[in-house]
Amino acid sequence: MKKYSRFKRHSLALAVSGVMSMGATGVIAQEKSWAIEEVTVTAQKREQSLQDVPISVSAFSGEMMKDAQIEDSKQLAVLTPGMSGDSNDSFMDSINIRGISTNGFGIGAEPSIGIYNNGVYLGRTGAAVTSLYDMERVEVVKGPQGTLFGRNASAGAISMHTRKADSELGGSVNLGLGQDGYREFTGVVNVPMTDTLNSRFAMYHRQQDDWVTNLTDGGKIGGEEVTAVRASFAYTGDNLSADLVLEYEDREVAPTIYRAYDDGTEFSTRLGLLDASLTNIGGKEDEIRSDVASNELKDEGEVWGATLNLEYELGDGYSLSSITGIRGSNYTYQEDFDGTDTHLFNWAQDQEQEYYSQEVRLNYNGDGPVSWFLGASAYKEEVKVRYDQTYDEDAMCASSFAGAYAPEYADPAYAISQVSDCDSLYYYWYYTSPGPGIGERNDSVDAEGDYEGWGIYGDATFSPTDKLDITVGARYTEDSRDFQTALGGEDRNYFWYSFPFYSSQPVKGSQTWENVSARVAVNYYLTDNISTFVNVSTGYKAGGFNTFDLQLPAGYTSSYEEAEADPSLIVVDGDDTADIDGISLSEFDEETVTSFELGIKSKWWDDRIQMDASIYQYQFEGMHAVYAIDGTQIRLTNVGDATGEGVEVSFRILPTANLDIYWGIAWADTSLDDPDADFCTQVDCRKGAQLPGTIDFSSSLVATYSIPMNTGEAYVTLENFYNSGAPGFGDFSGSSVYETESFKETNLRIGFRSNDAWSATFWVTNLTDEFAYGSPVAGDYNLPAHTIGMTEPRRIGVSASYEF
């Protein structure tokens, strides 16, 4: 299964004439001038200058993202203070905002970070990560969101807006070529159809050759091929405007890349006695070992959707808005989690999803001191998935049970011989059906979810003076879940490697959660160019069900010691729980968060300097997190109460008409303050431990120098990004042993923009060819230590575009 990784697919080089301002600032308009222009966003459901919005928002224009080769929403992480966790697959679990990850590999939970496309929620792995092409803008809103979007988001939100059709006949073509077979094409045409109806059509294609060698079969992985199309239609009448967007995307990208290494744990010694080849792990930086054929390692998905936005002007400052969304996806995934050429832990996922949503909002934005909106939203989701975890039974027996035998034998090799073919395993562990291992086993899960929910919410801003804005908002939410999971399959073993027991029939359950969340924000203008804000908000994420676990009824136990008084109550690996009265789904409660933020937004020196900063603190109750038991059994639970705090600063200066410098930095500190007692009996859990994925310090430095010419403008952009290390997947130990490596990257762009609507750029990503692995995972008795993900090597390429 996918675990935490923080490396991006491609370097994100910045556009020269579109240098952005980060954190509480935004992307500047593309027309170059010796002043920092205003940025308009709609984070509060109305058009506002970003300097007037009393929340932390990072905004990116479509032109900047195109020039910077930002290919999907996760790649925004490297440029956004307080956001991290880009990776090269379709999983959402790596995305992290202010130390909070979206966590969860099953379908029984919601992400902590909401992703929205034209106002429609995209919340599921395999469906949420789509390509960014022909975009109007993207806004990253940090902190809990309850009143600003149609769904709750407890950690933050990424709001994407595609380009609308307009009344001008025109279009553009963009081509890119680079090393390792990198090819990119974007084509756009905008066609007016009548005086009131316009259309816009866009196509995007990106591909890259494989670049990581699988030493087992000599094949390669790491490449990608993505194709997307979009048709947009816009109607503008006297009072009614309508935008219809139809889109489809086919994605074939690399799965998570795992690479085993020897960390001195008992795994390598034990399995080395069984099979000497198991100690032959690792390789060069761009080499892995996998028993899965290279062409079977995959992350493939199809995503389609239709969105209808309606705006009706009622007059006197009132308007009515409607957003209708229909989306669906098919998703297939296969990885080699153990990172060796032995069949220890291979993971596959096959998923189908459909999602429907409706949002209606009444807005008022008149000439007086008050503006407000009141909205209602509803959604329904149907999702079905099959998970398969396969392994070789003999290898599993040796790795899992040799430790139990070894203390009884002076010779560890003899202990291995007793379990390497499972012959004596079952008697030792109270099983009544002894027998040898018979090849590949499959711990499968079939799960289905039928989810629905609704909410009412509102937000109002009161401006008693020209210098003071006071905003209050609230939301009531109700989320209902019908869920079922069946842990089992025809290939199940006598004992259970991935789950504590199995169920030959689906176990079903239903639950409803409700919540009231709120926010209060005060924005005060010290001068026309300096404002300060205070924002206090609460957030919520519904509870859910574990996809990979079940809950035994009272009295039953999987502990031999606890069952001594009544052996009939023991339920151990390999037992079928379908006939046990009272067996139920493993449920976890909702998580809630309270956030406090103080910020300043300012411009100086005739708008040639912009400095924005914010200080925040949040407190989670019942925080959701995923962890692993014995390296293979995945659980999601309320791990306890947690806190986080940090500082984010962005600084931009135009010292001359030709030089533009941006620097964004972020510090963060998180802590598991009150861990759940049951949770800490299952993992190494320490009070005060930093939360997994928290990057202490990050920095983005970008400098652009432009040279005006008679025929256009030449430019040079140099950028440098740095991330400190972070605790790895499921690590609540407070130890720094298994931490991601710190990483820095430098990128270069040299280009020319003509006055005749064409441009050309030479680019180098990872200029100094830095290398680092992603999150390390500790070795256990049944799995080797391994890393998750790796940075890509230096690449050189060219891009050209033409507008007509």
Image (cartoon, grey):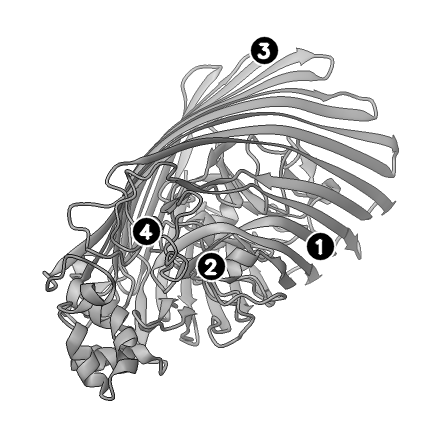
In the image, which is nearer the foreground, mark 2 or mark 4?
4
Badge 2 vs badge 4, beta-carbon distance below 8 Å? no
Q: Position of residue 186 (x, y in %)?
A: 35, 44
Horizontal and vertical percent position of residue 410: 25, 88
First in sequence, mark 1 or 3: give its number. Answer: 3
Which is more N-terminal, label 3 or label 4? Answer: 3
Identify residue for label 4.
571
Amino acid type, label 3:
Asp
Left or right of 715: which side holds 764? Answer: left
Earlier residue among tags 1 and 2: 2
Of all residues, the one furthest to the right in this rendering is 465
Vertical comparison of 269 with 442: above or below: below
- Looking at the rendered structure, the secondary structure element under dot 2 is loop
Callout 2: 10 Å neighbours few (<14), some, many (20+)? many
| CA–CA distance in space, label 2 to label 4 | 52 Å
Which residue is under mark 3?
238
Q: Can residue 416 be seen here?
A: yes
Closer to us: 184 or 710: 184
Q: Quadrant of the N terminus?
A: bottom left
Q: CA distance from mark 1 to mark 3?
A: 47 Å
Q: Residue furthest bottom?
A: 410
From mark 3 to mark 2, how far is it between C-alphas? Answer: 42 Å
